[in-house]
Image (cartoon, rainbow, N blue to C red):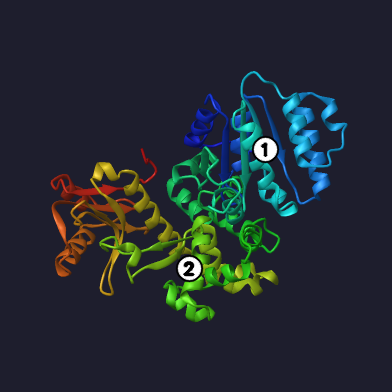
């Protein structure tokens, strides 16, 4: 069985609704590989339940398979000995045989497959829920990976099940510190590299555990045309999205450095308003995000908005590897590795900056930051910037993914940048330097006498 890591808050919420005195309808959704099935199995292991994973078989086959699963879970052979002409007949039989004492959990996993086979299935569930289940001792969990379909079937205003869910859980990738649960022997600099390769996706992290380090994992999983992640980008988009070709082109544009919606539209010959739909879809899947300078007072309307690939693996694929796919198809891995080294190093440095910002975000209360992000203009860039309620910078940070120790000159340059561009800072603004390789003695001595200067050599502890 796959290793179960974290998901404490999700388990707690599921347990709370299980203990509720009323029936519960839970919707669990999110992109593939994040561990939704593993979470559900962990949750229901101590409760009376039936877990059913749908597939792409025909409707009659799905009816029969669910009947078999219910029969096994309830230890009732009669349930599978009958042919059920309609879903309502199976629901009625299930109600006759399931225990009436305590809460019973029914999990329908890969829910989108049932809806593809029988487009009216959500309506069937809605009718039976309204007439029978909403006042029973049942906890019904609908779980799916195709985010757009799950939303359309269960949460949109036009959805048959709209307003009936008592719990909606959108599963996100694991936070960076949990990588060590999969790779306990890795040094921290190696953990950052592994995050740059696989992000917080549990399935990818399980694959990483087979290799001695980043270079070996990259070559065997991604650069080798027979590697387990070589086709992952295509597989992910085709499984999750009904318009994979357009989304592929968008990610390709983002990977090449085109991040403004107007520029992407011009490149793809699509109007900006049409692209918004696809961007929202990719954002729901945690694949892209929109970044604006943290000092922008109205981020939603800011013309400085810039889209980025959020998922580290896809950013690596579209930003560096994809352009050399034809070389990899002919097995020229060594040639590609040499050419890609500067770009891969830049990608890792980018991910290190991202993790530093997340580190500060997790400690926003400690730093008294209302929001954390990046601040930039055409003349300067600040890697980590925290803003208070008066819209002033109360934290300014620099990130250095270098094999050299950070010296006092880096701090002085950061201060000069603030002065030169007259950035709005608070009187007690904190200056935070992040370094992969530590700090010089001179800088450490200076920090010891400057209470507004912080040196952070490890971003692992987010508590």
Give above or below for 371 relative to 234.
above
Tell me where residue 134 appears, x and y as whole percent.
60, 32
| Secondary structure type for disc 1 | helix
Image point (50%, 80%), residue name? 267
The percent position of residue 364, horizontal first and vertical second, equals 29, 45
- Residue 436 makes an appearance in the image: no
Residue 101 in sight in this render: yes
Residue identifier under label 1:
128
Instruction: Give residue 82's quadrant in the image.
Output: top right
132 vs 151, nearest the viewer:
132
Residue 240: assigned label? none
Where in the figure is residue 95, as x and y percent of width and height?
A: 72, 28
Which numbered disc, 1 or 2, marks the residue that appears first in the sequence? 1
**Residue 295, image x and y in percent?**
25, 61
Relative to residue 325, is residue 196 drawn left or right? left
Q: Nearer the viewer, residue 407 or 29?
A: 29
- Residue at horizontal 65%, vertical 32%? 132
The secondary element bearing badge 2 is classed as helix
**According to the image, label 2 marks what residue?**
276
- Sort mark 1 into few (<14), some (14-19) or many (20+) by Cα contacts within 10 Å: some
């Amino acid at each position: 069985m796959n290793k179960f890591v974290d998901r404490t808050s999700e388990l707690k919420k599921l347990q709370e609704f299980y203990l509720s005195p009323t029936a519960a309808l839970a919707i669990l959704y999110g992109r593939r590989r994040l561990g939704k099935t593993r979470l559900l199995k962990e949750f229901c292991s101590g409760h009376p339940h039936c877990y059913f994973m749908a597939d792409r078989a025909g409707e009659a086959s799905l009816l029969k398979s669910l009947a078999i699963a219910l029969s096994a879970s309830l230890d009732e052979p009669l349930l599978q000995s009958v042919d059920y002409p309609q879903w309502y007949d199976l629901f009625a039989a299930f109600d006759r045989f399931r225990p009436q004492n305590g809460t019973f959990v029914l999990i329908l996993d890969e829910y989108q497959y049932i809806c593809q086979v029988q487009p009216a299935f959500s309506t069937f569930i809605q009718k039976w829920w309204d007439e029978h289940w909403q006042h029973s001792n049942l906890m019904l969990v609908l779980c799916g990976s195709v985010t757009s379909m799950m939303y359309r079937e269960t949460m949109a205003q036009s959805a048959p099940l709209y307003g009936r869910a008592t719990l909606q859980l959108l599963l996100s990738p694991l936070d960076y510190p949990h990588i060590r649960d999969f790779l306990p022997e890795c040094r921290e600099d190696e953990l950052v590299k592994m995050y740059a390769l696989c992000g917080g996706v549990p399935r990818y992290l399980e694959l990483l555990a087979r290799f001695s380090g980043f270079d070996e994992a990259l070559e065997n999983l991604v650069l080798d045309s027979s590697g387990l992640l070589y086709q992952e980008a295509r597989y992910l988009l085709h499984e999750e999205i009904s318009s994979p070709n357009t989304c592929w082109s968008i990610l390709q544009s983002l990977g090449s450095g085109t991040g403004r919606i107007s520029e992407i539209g011009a490149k793809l010959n699509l109007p900006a308003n049409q692209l918004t739909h696809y961007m929202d879809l990719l954002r729901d899947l945690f694949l892209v995000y929109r970044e604006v300078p943290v000092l922008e007072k109205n981020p939603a309307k800011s013309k400085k908005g810039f889209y980025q690939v959020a998922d580290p693996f896809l950013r690596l694929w579209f930003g560096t590897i994809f352009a050399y796919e034809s070389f990899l198809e002919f097995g020229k891995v060594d040639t590609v590795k040499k050419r890609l080294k500067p770009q891969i190093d830049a990608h890792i440095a980018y991910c290190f900056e991202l993790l530093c910002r997340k580190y500060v975000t997790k400690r926003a209360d400690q730093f008294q930051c209302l929001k954390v992000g990046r601040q930039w203009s055409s003349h300067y860039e600040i890697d980590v910037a925290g803003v208070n309620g008066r819209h002033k910078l109360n934290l300014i940070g620099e990130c250095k993914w270098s094999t050299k120790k950070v010296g006092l000159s880096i701090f002085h340059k950061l201060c000069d940048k603030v002065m030169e561009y007259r950035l709005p800072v608070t009187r007690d603004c904190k200056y935070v330097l992040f370094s992969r390789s530590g700090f010089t003695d001179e800088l450490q001595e200076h920090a010891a006498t400057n209470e507004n200067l912080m040196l952070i050599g490890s971003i692992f502890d987010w508590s």
